[in-house]
Amino acid sequence: MSDPSESDVRPWAQPLSRLYADEGIADVADRIDNLLSNYRRAIDQSNQKALSESDVLLITYGDTLIDGETPPLQVLHRFHGDYLNGIFDLVRNLPFHPDSSDDGSAVIDYYTVREDLGDWNDIAAVVREYANLPVEVDNDSRAALLGKEAYGVLSSLTSGTENALMVALGTGIGVAARLNGERVRGAHQTGGLLSCHITIDINGPMCICRNRGCAEALVSGYALVKVTSERAWYAKSSLAGEERPNFRMLTDAVRKGDRYARQGLDEFCDAWTALLVSLIHAFGPAHVVISGGFTRSADLFLPGVLDAVRDRLWGPESTLDVHIAKEPELSEVRGGNLPIRRAMNEQS
Ligand SMILES: [Zn+2]
């Protein structure tokens, strides 16, 4: 296989291939591309404080400062207040893990704070005090649902929105639910969110969650990269030979009339149908919002999936309304922004 960065004109493609050889570079470059374009649109360009040569930045590891049993993030907080306040314009700390290098620099999971350093409450305390900002910590799927309630498809509806379900089909499958006016959280803050791990195939592949045959393990974006090449239709399709076949390649092939790719997409549709039927039976929503990057190709698969879903729903549930998110990539940003704006309004 040739170096994928050679034909890729994006400026980060070649440095990526130096870092990670040729493993999944195109997919990583696509994801960077998506992140950049999504966040660029979400940033208020008129209200940016740009860095300049007069700014002083301190970068610290999570465990640079130690004081007995006190969590190091709390030690840094105290030390900053005692000695650093007013000296540095920015302090960058590296508390997240796991990382692929340099002790917290190349973070793999930005949601997980290294246990021995402290927790999200310690980070929130620093931000509250020094940035003078309110802090809310929540899951991106719940933020997306909140965004749809406040700004998106649910905001213009006049009834039924107290019971709503959001399913995002993309790299991962995101689920968030609202029951009787409250976002579902459960005893451990995972209620609703883990619904993407509903079992679709009891003989299916192991999932990252330790269950077997979850929707997430079968038909999320990253699962498709793995399971596609194991399917019978794959070898006959135009995707054959692709080391990392993804959803975009599959839909491109379908649009070009590849009937084997169509067969593959139909198989994945069966799993999405099973997932949606189970979720609707579990939560009983009046409105379902389908979101996520895959909806850019909704015309190829969603009408069929929704027809099949309605055929399988228990009587009253089949009357629900289904909506397609118009700007799925902005939901999390908008929803995450909302509680902060509310808190800032209360402050002022
Ligand atoms: Zn799972």
Image: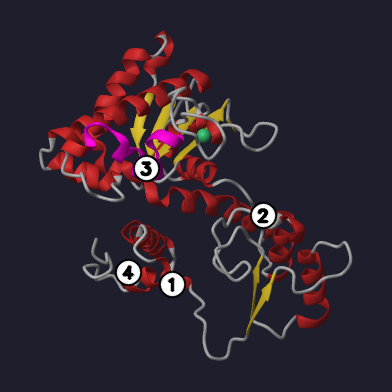
Q: Earlier in the sequence, mark 3 or mark 4?
A: 4
The percent position of residue 182, horizontal first and vertical second, equals 60, 32
Q: Position of residue 188 (x, y in %)?
A: 69, 36
C-alpha distance separating marks 4 and 2: 45 Å
Disc 1 secondary structure class: helix
Q: CA distance from mark 2 to mark 1?
A: 23 Å
Q: Which mark is residue 13?
A: 4
The answer to whether the residue labelled 1 contacts the one labelled 3, judged by CB atoms less than 8 Å apart, is no
- Does dot 2 land on a helix, a strand or a loop? helix
Q: Is residue 232 magenta?
A: yes
Q: Main secondary structure of the magenta part?
A: helix
Say left or right for 200 vs 251. Answer: right
The amino acid on which the numbered mark 4 sits, given as a three-letter code, is: Ala
- First in residue order: circle 4 vs circle 1: 4
Q: Nearer the viewer, residue 102 or 286?
A: 102
Please identify the quarter of the rendering in which residue 251 is found: top left
